[in-house]
């Protein structure tokens, strides 16, 4: 993790810049560093601003934009699923070894 505060790119303006400030505040509250990821975060904010504008104009955004947005959201842990961590694996039952190759010669059954 890099030290310091994220620096907003100069080209990020308007709604995207406001989204940047909101997201950075959320990440700071979470203890999530985004230093070193400023370009990706700026692209994420810019894409979100563009999607909002399209929705306001009652336009349907292309699926590719929505897919890219979902990818950024997951990368920055902004989805419920991305915040829960890896799912717990069930414990192996007594039949878990079925279908496995036999142990090598001299194994426990020799």
Image (spheres, rainbow, N blue to C red):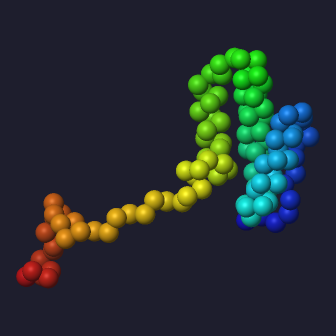
Q: Position of residue 26 (x, y in %)?
A: 77, 54
Q: Is residue 16 left or right of residue 94?
A: right
Rendering quarter of residue 95: bottom left
Q: Is residue 69 above or below residue 93?
A: above
Rendering quarter of residue 39: top right
Q: Position of residue 51 (x, y in %)?
A: 72, 28
Asked whether residue 75 is in view, the answer is no
Q: Is residue 76 above or below residue 31?
A: above
Which is nearer the eye, 88 or 46?
Answer: 88
Q: Residue furthest left?
A: 110
Q: Is residue 39 left or right of residue 65?
A: right
The residue sitting at 59% across, 33% down in the picture is 67
Asked whether residue 72 is in view, the answer is yes
Q: Position of residue 55 (x, y in %)?
A: 72, 23
Q: How many marks?
A: 0
Rendering quarter of residue 12: top right
Q: Is residue 76 left or right of residue 50?
A: left
Which is nearer the eye, 46 or 58?
Answer: 58
Which is nearer the eye, 63 or 57?
Answer: 57
- Viewport quadrant of the N terminus: bottom right
Q: Position of residue 109 (x, y in %)?
A: 9, 80
The residue sitting at 7% across, 82% down in the picture is 110
The residue sitting at 77% across, 39% down in the picture is 45
Q: Is residue 27 above or below residue 53?
A: below
Q: Is residue 41 above or below residue 86?
A: above
The residue sitting at 59% across, 50% down in the picture is 80
């Amino acid at each position: 993790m890099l030290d310091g505060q994220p620096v907003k790119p100069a080209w990020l303006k308007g709604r995207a810049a406001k989204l940047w400030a909101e997201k950075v505040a959320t990440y700071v509250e979470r203890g999530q560093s985004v230093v070193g990821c400023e370009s990706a975060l700026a692209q994420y904010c810019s894409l979100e601003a563009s999607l909002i504008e399209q929705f306001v104009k009652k336009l349907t955004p292309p699926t590719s934009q929505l897919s890219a947005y979902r990818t950024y959201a997951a990368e920055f842990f902004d989805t419920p699923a991305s915040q829960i961590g890896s799912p717990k694996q069930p414990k192996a039952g007594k039949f878990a070894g079925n279908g496995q190759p036999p142990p090598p010669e001299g194994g426990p059954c020799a």
